[in-house]
Amino acid sequence: MRYTSARMSGADRYYDWLAGCFGNVQEAPASFHLSQFSELELQARWFCGEFGRSFRTLSGDAVEIVQFGEWNREAGPDFRSAAVSINGARPVRGAIELDADVRDWERHGHAVNPAYNNVALHVFWNVGKSELFTQTLSGRAVPQVLLNARVDGTAPNRVPLVRCGRCFEMLAAMPEGKVADLLAAAAHYRMRRKARRIGAAAEIHGEHEAPYQFVAEALGYKGNKVPFLLLAQRFPVRNLRKWRDEAESILFGISGFLTEMDLQRVPGDTKEYLRQLWAGWWARRAEFANLVLPVRMWKCGGVRPMNHPQRRIGALAEIARRWPKLREVLGSANPQVIARFFSTLSHDYWDYHYTLTSGAARTRMALVGPERVNGIVMNVVLPLALRDCPSQFEKLQQLAAPDYNLRVKNAALRLFGKEAKRVALLRTSVNQQGILQIYDDFCSHDFTDCIACRFPEQIAQWR
């Protein structure tokens, strides 16, 4: 069944349905405790605006982040040149410090460090039993904000058992049209959440930087989303106006991979490419040295060769070089036009290499393959289109998916087993997004092997 804007949207219906199961939706499905994420990832999420910009201090004052400032990777507070308004007053310019715990202000010596004298806001996500105040060396009290203890996203390192769940029989007995309707509504809900995330980032970074950040994140797929988001935040697309010729070298330099490379141990056809990267990076190294990511952040093991992060950085460099055209293409919300654009991306080295240490392949490989193009459509294009024109969702509802990735396969087995008619529903990208949303909302939260999961009983409530 299709729903027009005059009726309740699928996203709203799914939200209400979840609320009937969990009560406060914001606190239950698809949200995870902040302690499950690294401090660097939470800072990246903060800089994307995912926590919002309106808060309450511990003392009850209203806080509005007028300007998020610049991410400081040198000594001193985390974000410089920010602007904060307290209780609607004129914004105060200063820095913002993010800590895991309120006690870190004292533990890390910020209270006696003059570099922290201009901090306008202290943000943290843990508090101790005793009340602690944040004060600068000059004795000024700094407003304190405790972030919500939960954040939207995918549960880190949480993989439910891959076998049929209790919901299988209920879904098998459910009319096919009703199952398709549930999947579409869950997908609409998922896309709307992504649209809000991109919208929040666009308010902070602009209509070019936000899509660029999320295209980069989509290139990282599951294991390398955070380092790719950090790359895009640390070398924004606006830098191309100044460092266009060195962009690829700078991206590889910031990634940390260049420091791991030994020219004596790489294949002969790689040495010249590495020399070019090093020449560009060496000239700009002093300016960007404080932005280099720790190599341990990258997940290289268990990754398909064509998806290796080094190869993806090469693709990101080419995307950044052609960003004005890609931004125009993304705005069309036409999957065929977008696919054609990505088919034209080419790189003399990465068309034939998997990594910086692998030999050359015999045949050319797509720089960004169909599966990742589909991921960009689902994670960037469709949310952007929904934000600007909600009716776009129905236009893309029958968009075919290139293949099932592992998460979709696991979710399908969990919910549908080997029921051919049900699995056939997942031939569209939108329905794959729908089953992933249900999987995140229920399976990823269940630690009882389905015994206490509410989804099987909740299925009967879908209308």
Image (spheres, rainbow, N blue to C red):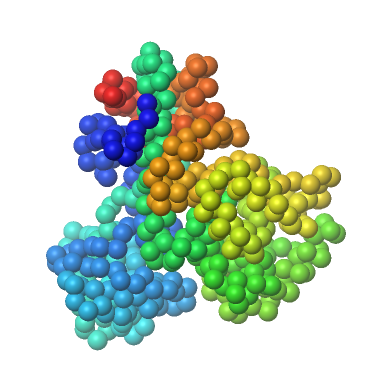
Residue at screen point 40% across, 48% down = 389
Residue 105 lies, with reference to residue 196, above or below; the image says below
- x and y percent of residue 283 in the render? 68, 79
Q: Quadrant of the C terminus?
A: top left
- x and y percent of residue 462 in the render? 29, 25
* Residue 225 as seen in the image, left or right of residue 147: right
- x and y percent of residue 127 in the render? 24, 60
Tag count: 0
Residue 438 lies, with reference to residue 451, above or below; the image says below
When asked about the image quadrant of residue 177, the answer is top left
Task: Work out whether residue 270 or residue 451 is closer to the camera in this orientation and state it.
Answer: 270
- x and y percent of residue 107 in the render? 32, 70
| Residue 182 visible in the current orientation | yes
Residue 327 lies, with reference to residue 67, above or below; the image says above
* Residue 255 as seen in the image, left or right of residue 362: left
Residue 394 lies, with reference to residue 323, above or below; the image says above
Task: Work out whether residue 32 or residue 378 is closer to the camera in this orientation and state it.
Answer: 378
Q: Residue furthest left?
A: 60
Residue at screen point 66% across, 44% down = 369
Residue at screen point 27% across, 74% down = 84
Task: Work out whether residue 106 or residue 69 is closer to the camera in this orientation and state it.
Answer: 69
Residue at screen point 35% across, 75% down = 82
| Residue 40 visible in the current orientation | no
When asked about the image quadrant of residue 298, the answer is bottom right
Task: Work out whether residue 93 or residue 183 is closer to the camera in this orientation and state it.
Answer: 183
Q: Quadrant of the N terminus?
A: top left
